[in-house]
Protein backbone atom coordinates (compact mmCIF):
# COMPACT_ATOMS: atom_id res chain seq x y z
CA UNK A 1 0.00 0.00 0.00
CA UNK A 2 0.97 3.63 -0.55
CA UNK A 3 2.60 5.84 2.07
CA UNK A 4 0.12 8.31 3.61
CA UNK A 5 0.20 12.11 3.36
CA UNK A 6 1.48 13.90 6.47
CA UNK A 7 -0.38 17.01 7.60
CA UNK A 8 1.31 19.15 10.25
CA UNK A 9 -1.28 21.19 12.18
CA UNK A 10 -4.86 20.37 13.18
CA UNK A 11 -6.16 23.92 12.95
CA UNK A 12 -8.92 24.70 10.49
CA UNK A 13 -6.47 24.88 7.54
CA UNK A 14 -4.94 21.45 8.18
CA UNK A 15 -8.34 19.85 8.74
CA UNK A 16 -9.80 21.51 5.66
CA UNK A 17 -7.02 19.92 3.59
CA UNK A 18 -7.33 16.60 5.44
CA UNK A 19 -11.05 16.28 4.72
CA UNK A 20 -10.65 16.85 1.01
CA UNK A 21 -7.71 14.43 0.73
CA UNK A 22 -9.59 11.81 2.75
CA UNK A 23 -12.68 12.20 0.53
CA UNK A 24 -10.42 11.62 -2.48
CA UNK A 25 -9.40 8.32 -0.85
CA UNK A 26 -5.95 9.45 0.12
CA UNK A 27 -4.60 8.20 3.44
CA UNK A 28 -3.57 11.04 5.75
CA UNK A 29 -1.86 11.29 9.12
CA UNK A 30 -2.12 14.49 11.16
CA UNK A 31 0.28 15.88 13.76
CA UNK A 32 -0.17 18.63 16.32
CA UNK A 33 1.99 19.93 19.11
CA UNK A 34 -1.10 20.59 21.24
CA UNK A 35 -3.20 18.03 23.11
CA UNK A 36 -6.22 18.68 20.92
CA UNK A 37 -7.30 20.14 17.60
CA UNK A 38 -8.35 23.67 16.71
CA UNK A 39 -5.23 25.80 17.10
CA UNK A 40 -6.30 29.42 17.18
CA UNK A 41 -9.96 28.45 16.94
CA UNK A 42 -9.87 26.06 19.87
CA UNK A 43 -11.82 26.77 23.04
CA UNK A 44 -10.27 26.43 26.46
CA UNK A 45 -11.91 24.44 29.22
CA UNK A 46 -11.69 26.31 32.49
CA UNK A 47 -13.29 26.55 35.93
CA UNK A 48 -15.57 29.17 34.36
CA UNK A 49 -16.72 26.83 31.59
CA UNK A 50 -15.53 26.81 28.00
CA UNK A 51 -13.89 30.04 26.80
CA UNK A 52 -13.17 31.23 23.27
CA UNK A 53 -9.79 32.87 23.76
CA UNK A 54 -8.81 32.93 20.07
CA UNK A 55 -11.26 33.20 17.15
CA UNK A 56 -14.44 34.82 18.44
CA UNK A 57 -16.77 34.03 15.56
CA UNK A 58 -16.42 33.83 11.82
CA UNK A 59 -18.10 35.18 8.74
CA UNK A 60 -18.59 33.39 5.41
CA UNK A 61 -18.26 35.54 2.31
CA UNK A 62 -17.01 32.87 -0.10
CA UNK A 63 -19.81 30.77 -1.60
CA UNK A 64 -18.07 27.41 -1.06
CA UNK A 65 -17.25 28.25 2.53
CA UNK A 66 -20.83 29.40 3.08
CA UNK A 67 -22.16 26.07 1.84
CA UNK A 68 -19.70 24.21 4.05
CA UNK A 69 -20.76 26.20 7.12
CA UNK A 70 -24.40 25.26 6.38
CA UNK A 71 -23.33 21.60 6.39
CA UNK A 72 -21.58 22.11 9.70
CA UNK A 73 -24.83 23.60 11.00
CA UNK A 74 -26.70 20.45 9.89
CA UNK A 75 -24.11 18.38 11.78
CA UNK A 76 -24.79 20.48 14.87
CA UNK A 77 -21.22 21.82 15.02
CA UNK A 78 -22.03 25.52 14.51
CA UNK A 79 -24.75 28.01 15.18
CA UNK A 80 -25.36 31.67 14.55
CA UNK A 81 -24.34 34.16 17.19
CA UNK A 82 -26.19 37.47 16.99
CA UNK A 83 -24.62 39.59 19.70
CA UNK A 84 -25.98 42.91 20.79
CA UNK A 85 -23.19 44.77 19.02
CA UNK A 86 -21.56 48.00 20.14
CA UNK A 87 -18.59 50.04 19.11
CA UNK A 88 -16.34 52.34 21.05
CA UNK A 89 -14.55 55.33 19.54
CA UNK A 90 -12.64 57.91 21.59
CA UNK A 91 -14.14 56.48 24.75
CA UNK A 92 -17.70 56.84 23.40
CA UNK A 93 -19.71 53.63 23.60
CA UNK A 94 -22.58 53.39 21.10
CA UNK A 95 -24.87 50.58 19.89
CA UNK A 96 -23.76 49.39 16.45
CA UNK A 97 -26.22 46.78 15.22
CA UNK A 98 -25.70 45.32 11.75
CA UNK A 99 -26.98 42.57 9.45
CA UNK A 100 -23.79 40.48 9.35
CA UNK A 101 -24.21 36.71 9.86
CA UNK A 102 -21.73 35.53 12.49
CA UNK A 103 -21.00 31.88 13.26
CA UNK A 104 -19.55 30.10 16.29
CA UNK A 105 -18.83 26.46 17.08
CA UNK A 106 -21.36 24.84 19.45
CA UNK A 107 -21.29 24.00 22.24
CA UNK A 108 -17.67 25.17 21.97
CA UNK A 109 -15.45 26.56 19.20
CA UNK A 110 -13.54 23.27 19.17
CA UNK A 111 -16.64 21.34 18.05
CA UNK A 112 -15.84 22.20 14.43
CA UNK A 113 -12.30 20.87 14.24
CA UNK A 114 -13.22 17.93 16.49
CA UNK A 115 -16.02 17.09 14.07
CA UNK A 116 -13.77 17.46 11.04
CA UNK A 117 -11.09 15.31 12.62
CA UNK A 118 -13.56 12.50 13.31
CA UNK A 119 -11.66 9.22 13.16
CA UNK A 120 -8.73 10.45 11.05
CA UNK A 121 -5.37 9.21 12.35
CA UNK A 122 -3.63 11.87 14.42
CA UNK A 123 -0.69 12.21 16.77
CA UNK A 124 -1.15 14.94 19.40
CA UNK A 125 1.45 16.43 21.77
CA UNK A 126 3.97 16.00 18.97
CA UNK A 127 5.91 19.08 17.86
CA UNK A 128 7.49 18.53 14.46
CA UNK A 129 10.91 20.16 14.20
CA UNK A 130 12.23 18.79 10.92
CA UNK A 131 10.79 17.66 7.59
CA UNK A 132 13.14 15.99 5.15
CA UNK A 133 12.89 14.03 1.96
CA UNK A 134 14.77 10.83 1.21
CA UNK A 135 15.02 9.37 -2.27
CA UNK A 136 11.31 8.70 -2.48
CA UNK A 137 9.60 9.48 0.78
CA UNK A 138 9.31 12.15 3.45
CA UNK A 139 10.28 11.74 7.09
CA UNK A 140 9.26 13.98 9.99
CA UNK A 141 11.30 14.39 13.16
CA UNK A 142 9.67 15.59 16.38
CA UNK A 143 11.07 17.56 19.33
CA UNK A 144 12.01 14.36 21.19
CA UNK A 145 14.11 13.22 18.22
CA UNK A 146 11.67 10.48 17.16
CA UNK A 147 11.06 9.98 13.42
CA UNK A 148 7.72 9.52 11.71
CA UNK A 149 7.21 8.19 8.21
CA UNK A 150 7.48 7.32 5.43
CA UNK A 151 5.05 9.83 3.86
CA UNK A 152 4.34 10.46 0.18
CA UNK A 153 3.66 14.21 0.59
CA UNK A 154 3.72 16.79 3.38
CA UNK A 155 1.20 19.57 4.03
CA UNK A 156 2.48 22.19 6.48
CA UNK A 157 -0.52 23.91 8.08
CA UNK A 158 1.00 26.01 10.88
CA UNK A 159 1.53 29.79 11.33
CA UNK A 160 4.08 31.29 8.91
CA UNK A 161 6.99 31.78 11.35
CA UNK A 162 6.74 28.13 12.38
CA UNK A 163 6.14 26.98 8.79
CA UNK A 164 9.38 28.57 7.56
CA UNK A 165 11.53 26.05 9.45
CA UNK A 166 9.46 23.08 8.30
CA UNK A 167 9.69 24.15 4.65
CA UNK A 168 13.52 24.14 4.54
CA UNK A 169 13.54 21.45 1.81
CA UNK A 170 11.97 24.02 -0.53
CA UNK A 171 13.97 27.23 0.09
CA UNK A 172 11.64 29.35 -2.05
CA UNK A 173 8.59 28.37 -0.01
CA UNK A 174 10.55 28.79 3.21
CA UNK A 175 11.53 32.32 2.16
CA UNK A 176 7.92 33.27 1.43
CA UNK A 177 6.78 31.96 4.83
CA UNK A 178 9.69 33.73 6.55
CA UNK A 179 8.65 37.02 4.94
CA UNK A 180 5.26 37.01 6.71
CA UNK A 181 5.12 39.09 9.88
CA UNK A 182 2.57 37.93 12.41
CA UNK A 183 1.20 40.11 15.21
CA UNK A 184 0.51 38.99 18.78
CA UNK A 185 -2.74 39.30 20.75
CA UNK A 186 -3.15 39.27 24.53
CA UNK A 187 -6.46 37.64 25.48
CA UNK A 188 -8.03 37.98 28.93
CA UNK A 189 -11.09 36.15 30.26
CA UNK A 190 -13.09 37.44 33.21
CA UNK A 191 -15.90 35.65 35.05
CA UNK A 192 -18.39 37.49 37.28
CA UNK A 193 -20.61 35.91 39.92
CA UNK A 194 -23.58 38.13 39.03
CA UNK A 195 -24.35 39.11 35.41
CA UNK A 196 -23.05 42.58 34.55
CA UNK A 197 -25.87 45.07 34.18
CA UNK A 198 -25.40 45.85 30.48
CA UNK A 199 -26.99 44.89 27.16
CA UNK A 200 -23.57 44.74 25.48
CA UNK A 201 -22.56 41.33 24.06
CA UNK A 202 -19.93 42.27 21.47
CA UNK A 203 -17.94 45.47 20.98
CA UNK A 204 -15.41 46.66 18.40
CA UNK A 205 -13.04 49.00 20.18
CA UNK A 206 -10.30 51.12 18.73
CA UNK A 207 -8.54 52.16 21.83
CA UNK A 208 -4.98 52.15 22.93
CA UNK A 209 -5.31 48.82 24.72
CA UNK A 210 -8.57 47.09 23.79
CA UNK A 211 -9.49 45.79 20.35
CA UNK A 212 -12.55 43.67 21.07
CA UNK A 213 -14.90 42.67 23.89
CA UNK A 214 -17.25 39.69 23.91
CA UNK A 215 -19.73 38.34 26.39
CA UNK A 216 -18.61 34.73 26.03
CA UNK A 217 -21.66 33.50 27.93
CA UNK A 218 -23.98 35.01 25.26
CA UNK A 219 -22.80 32.54 22.61
CA UNK A 220 -25.12 29.61 21.90
CA UNK A 221 -24.63 26.53 24.08
CA UNK A 222 -22.05 27.98 26.47
CA UNK A 223 -22.36 26.62 29.98
CA UNK A 224 -20.90 27.59 33.34
CA UNK A 225 -22.31 29.52 36.26
CA UNK A 226 -20.36 32.75 35.78
CA UNK A 227 -21.01 35.66 33.42
CA UNK A 228 -17.87 35.21 31.29
CA UNK A 229 -16.23 37.87 29.11
CA UNK A 230 -13.27 37.79 26.71
CA UNK A 231 -11.14 40.88 26.07
CA UNK A 232 -8.56 41.17 23.27
CA UNK A 233 -5.71 43.66 23.26
CA UNK A 234 -4.84 45.47 20.03
CA UNK A 235 -1.84 44.24 18.07
CA UNK A 236 0.27 47.23 19.03
CA UNK A 237 -0.63 47.14 22.73
CA UNK A 238 0.00 43.38 22.78
CA UNK A 239 3.37 43.84 21.05
CA UNK A 240 4.38 46.58 23.48
CA UNK A 241 3.35 44.46 26.47
CA UNK A 242 4.49 41.10 25.19
CA UNK A 243 6.47 40.26 28.33
CA UNK A 244 4.18 41.82 30.92
CA UNK A 245 3.30 39.21 33.60
CA UNK A 246 -0.20 37.73 33.18
CA UNK A 247 -1.45 39.31 36.41
CA UNK A 248 -0.51 42.76 35.13
CA UNK A 249 -2.11 42.12 31.72
CA UNK A 250 -5.35 41.09 33.45
CA UNK A 251 -5.27 44.19 35.63
CA UNK A 252 -4.66 46.55 32.69
CA UNK A 253 -7.29 45.10 30.35
CA UNK A 254 -9.82 44.67 33.17
CA UNK A 255 -9.23 48.35 33.99
CA UNK A 256 -9.73 49.44 30.38
CA UNK A 257 -12.91 47.33 30.21
CA UNK A 258 -14.32 48.82 33.43
CA UNK A 259 -13.62 52.33 32.15
CA UNK A 260 -15.27 51.69 28.79
CA UNK A 261 -18.41 49.77 29.70
CA UNK A 262 -21.68 51.42 30.78
CA UNK A 263 -22.11 49.60 34.09
CA UNK A 264 -20.39 48.85 37.38
CA UNK A 265 -17.69 46.19 37.02
CA UNK A 266 -17.00 44.40 40.30
CA UNK A 267 -13.92 42.32 41.03
CA UNK A 268 -14.07 39.18 38.87
CA UNK A 269 -14.47 35.75 40.44
CA UNK A 270 -12.33 34.20 37.72
CA UNK A 271 -9.49 35.56 35.57
CA UNK A 272 -7.18 34.09 32.96
CA UNK A 273 -4.72 35.52 30.45
CA UNK A 274 -3.41 33.91 27.28
CA UNK A 275 -0.76 35.28 24.95
CA UNK A 276 -1.09 34.44 21.25
CA UNK A 277 2.34 35.09 19.75
CA UNK A 278 1.26 34.52 16.14
CA UNK A 279 -2.34 35.68 16.27
CA UNK A 280 -2.73 37.35 12.89
CA UNK A 281 -0.68 38.15 9.81
CA UNK A 282 0.26 41.87 9.75
CA UNK A 283 -1.35 42.02 6.30
CA UNK A 284 -3.49 39.87 4.03
CA UNK A 285 -1.94 37.94 1.11
CA UNK A 286 -3.31 36.33 -2.05
CA UNK A 287 -1.20 33.20 -2.28
CA UNK A 288 -4.07 30.76 -1.58
CA UNK A 289 -1.49 28.11 -0.70
CA UNK A 290 2.20 27.44 -1.37
CA UNK A 291 3.30 24.40 -3.35
CA UNK A 292 6.39 22.68 -4.63
CA UNK A 293 4.59 20.01 -6.64
CA UNK A 294 7.74 18.25 -7.84
CA UNK A 295 8.88 17.75 -4.25
CA UNK A 296 5.38 17.07 -2.92
CA UNK A 297 5.56 19.79 -0.28
CA UNK A 298 2.62 22.14 0.41
CA UNK A 299 1.85 24.93 2.86
CA UNK A 300 -1.47 26.45 3.86
CA UNK A 301 -2.93 28.58 6.62
CA UNK A 302 -4.70 31.84 7.31
CA UNK A 303 -1.49 33.74 6.46
CA UNK A 304 -1.78 32.66 2.79
CA UNK A 305 -5.03 34.65 2.55
CA UNK A 306 -7.08 36.87 4.85
CA UNK A 307 -5.93 35.98 8.38
CA UNK A 308 -9.43 34.76 9.24
CA UNK A 309 -11.08 31.39 9.76
CA UNK A 310 -12.56 31.56 6.27
CA UNK A 311 -9.16 32.30 4.72
CA UNK A 312 -7.55 29.41 6.60
CA UNK A 313 -10.25 27.00 5.42
CA UNK A 314 -9.97 28.18 1.81
CA UNK A 315 -6.19 27.87 1.95
CA UNK A 316 -6.49 24.26 3.13
CA UNK A 317 -8.87 23.54 0.25
CA UNK A 318 -6.40 24.97 -2.22
CA UNK A 319 -3.44 22.99 -0.84
CA UNK A 320 -5.47 19.76 -1.13
CA UNK A 321 -6.67 20.63 -4.64
CA UNK A 322 -3.15 21.26 -5.86
CA UNK A 323 -1.82 18.10 -4.26
CA UNK A 324 -4.55 15.96 -5.86
CA UNK A 325 -3.94 17.63 -9.22
CA UNK A 326 -0.31 16.50 -9.05
CA UNK A 327 -0.83 12.87 -8.04
P1 LIG B 1 -3.81 27.50 13.52
O1 LIG B 1 -5.17 27.55 14.07
O2 LIG B 1 -2.76 28.30 14.21
O3 LIG B 1 -3.39 25.96 13.47
C1 LIG B 1 -2.06 25.55 13.45
C2 LIG B 1 -1.89 24.28 14.29
O4 LIG B 1 -0.56 23.81 14.11
C3 LIG B 1 -2.06 24.53 15.79
O5 LIG B 1 -3.00 23.60 16.30
C4 LIG B 1 -0.66 24.32 16.37
O6 LIG B 1 -0.70 23.71 17.65
C5 LIG B 1 -0.04 23.39 15.34
N1 LIG B 1 1.42 23.51 15.23
C6 LIG B 1 2.17 24.64 15.09
N2 LIG B 1 3.48 24.33 14.95
C7 LIG B 1 3.56 22.98 15.00
C8 LIG B 1 4.64 22.06 14.91
N3 LIG B 1 5.90 22.48 14.76
N4 LIG B 1 4.37 20.73 15.00
C9 LIG B 1 3.08 20.30 15.18
N5 LIG B 1 2.03 21.13 15.27
C10 LIG B 1 2.27 22.44 15.18
N6 LIG B 1 -10.62 34.72 12.80
C11 LIG B 1 -11.90 35.01 12.46
O7 LIG B 1 -12.34 34.64 11.36
N7 LIG B 1 -12.72 35.69 13.32
C12 LIG B 1 -12.27 36.11 14.53
O8 LIG B 1 -13.04 36.67 15.30
C13 LIG B 1 -10.94 35.84 14.90
N8 LIG B 1 -10.45 36.27 16.08
C14 LIG B 1 -9.21 35.89 16.46
C15 LIG B 1 -8.74 36.27 17.71
C16 LIG B 1 -7.50 35.85 18.15
C17 LIG B 1 -7.00 36.27 19.51
C18 LIG B 1 -6.70 35.01 17.34
C19 LIG B 1 -5.39 34.49 17.82
C20 LIG B 1 -7.15 34.66 16.09
C21 LIG B 1 -8.40 35.11 15.62
N9 LIG B 1 -8.88 34.80 14.37
C22 LIG B 1 -10.14 35.11 14.00
C23 LIG B 1 -8.01 34.14 13.39
C24 LIG B 1 -8.31 32.63 13.27
O9 LIG B 1 -8.30 32.06 14.55
C25 LIG B 1 -7.21 32.03 12.41
O10 LIG B 1 -7.17 32.70 11.16
C26 LIG B 1 -7.41 30.55 12.11
O11 LIG B 1 -7.92 29.84 13.22
C27 LIG B 1 -6.06 29.99 11.66
O12 LIG B 1 -6.15 28.62 11.34
P2 LIG B 1 -4.87 27.83 10.82
O13 LIG B 1 -5.28 26.42 10.66
O14 LIG B 1 -4.28 28.55 9.66
O15 LIG B 1 -3.77 27.97 11.99
P1 LIG C 1 -16.78 41.32 10.73
O1 LIG C 1 -17.32 41.59 9.39
O2 LIG C 1 -17.71 41.16 11.86
O3 LIG C 1 -15.77 42.49 11.15
C1 LIG C 1 -14.80 43.10 10.35
C2 LIG C 1 -14.48 44.49 10.87
O4 LIG C 1 -15.55 45.37 10.52
C3 LIG C 1 -14.38 44.60 12.38
O5 LIG C 1 -13.05 44.42 12.83
C4 LIG C 1 -14.87 46.01 12.66
O6 LIG C 1 -13.81 46.92 12.55
C5 LIG C 1 -15.84 46.28 11.55
N1 LIG C 1 -17.25 46.05 11.98
C6 LIG C 1 -18.03 44.99 11.63
N2 LIG C 1 -19.25 45.10 12.17
C7 LIG C 1 -19.26 46.25 12.86
C8 LIG C 1 -20.25 46.90 13.65
N3 LIG C 1 -21.48 46.39 13.86
N4 LIG C 1 -19.92 48.09 14.23
C9 LIG C 1 -18.70 48.62 14.06
N5 LIG C 1 -17.72 48.03 13.32
C10 LIG C 1 -17.99 46.86 12.74
O7 LIG C 1 -15.89 39.99 10.72
P2 LIG C 1 -14.71 39.47 9.78
O8 LIG C 1 -14.52 40.31 8.57
O9 LIG C 1 -14.92 38.04 9.62
O10 LIG C 1 -13.46 39.75 10.71
C11 LIG C 1 -13.17 38.94 11.79
C12 LIG C 1 -12.82 39.70 13.04
O11 LIG C 1 -11.83 38.94 13.70
C13 LIG C 1 -12.25 41.09 12.86
O12 LIG C 1 -12.82 41.91 13.83
C14 LIG C 1 -10.78 40.93 13.17
O13 LIG C 1 -10.21 42.07 13.77
C15 LIG C 1 -10.80 39.78 14.15
N6 LIG C 1 -9.54 39.05 14.15
C16 LIG C 1 -8.75 39.19 15.23
C17 LIG C 1 -7.52 38.55 15.30
C18 LIG C 1 -6.65 38.73 16.47
O14 LIG C 1 -5.58 38.19 16.48
N7 LIG C 1 -7.06 39.47 17.49
C19 LIG C 1 -7.12 37.74 14.23
C20 LIG C 1 -7.95 37.60 13.13
C21 LIG C 1 -9.18 38.25 13.11
Image: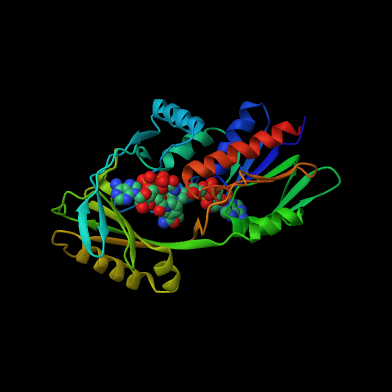
Q: In the rendered image, which quarter contains the N terminus?
A: top right
In the shown orientation, is residue 7 left or right of residue 117? right
Whether 104 is drawn above or below 284: the answer is above
Residue 135 spot, x, y in % from top left: 86, 46
Tell me which residue sits at (20%, 66%) in the image. Answer: 259
Q: How is the image coloured?
A: rainbow
Q: Against 211, is 322 above or below?
A: above
Q: Position of residue 243 (x, y in %)?
A: 44, 74
Residue 148: x, y in percent?
A: 71, 48
Q: Is residue 173 left or right of residue 318?
A: right
Against 34, is 75 above or below?
A: above
Q: Residue at x 59, y 51 (%)?
A: 158
Q: Is residue 123 visible?
A: yes
Q: Is residue 45 visible?
A: no
At a point 74% along the width and 44% down the height, the residue shown is 149
Along the viewing direction, whichever of 83 and 149 lies nearer the viewer: 83
Front one among 148 and 327:
327
Residue 256 picture location, percent across and down: 26, 67
Q: Is residue 190 left or right of residue 43?
A: left
Amino acid sequence: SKAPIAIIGTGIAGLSAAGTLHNAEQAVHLFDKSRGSGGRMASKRSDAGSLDLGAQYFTARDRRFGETVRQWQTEGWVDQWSPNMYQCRDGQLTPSADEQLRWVGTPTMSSITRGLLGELPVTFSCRITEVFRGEQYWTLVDATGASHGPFSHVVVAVPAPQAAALLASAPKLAAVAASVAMEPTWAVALGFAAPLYTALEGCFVQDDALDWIARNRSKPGRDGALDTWVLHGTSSWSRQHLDLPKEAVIERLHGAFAELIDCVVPAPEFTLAHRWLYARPAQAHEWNALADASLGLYACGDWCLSGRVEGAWLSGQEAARRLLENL
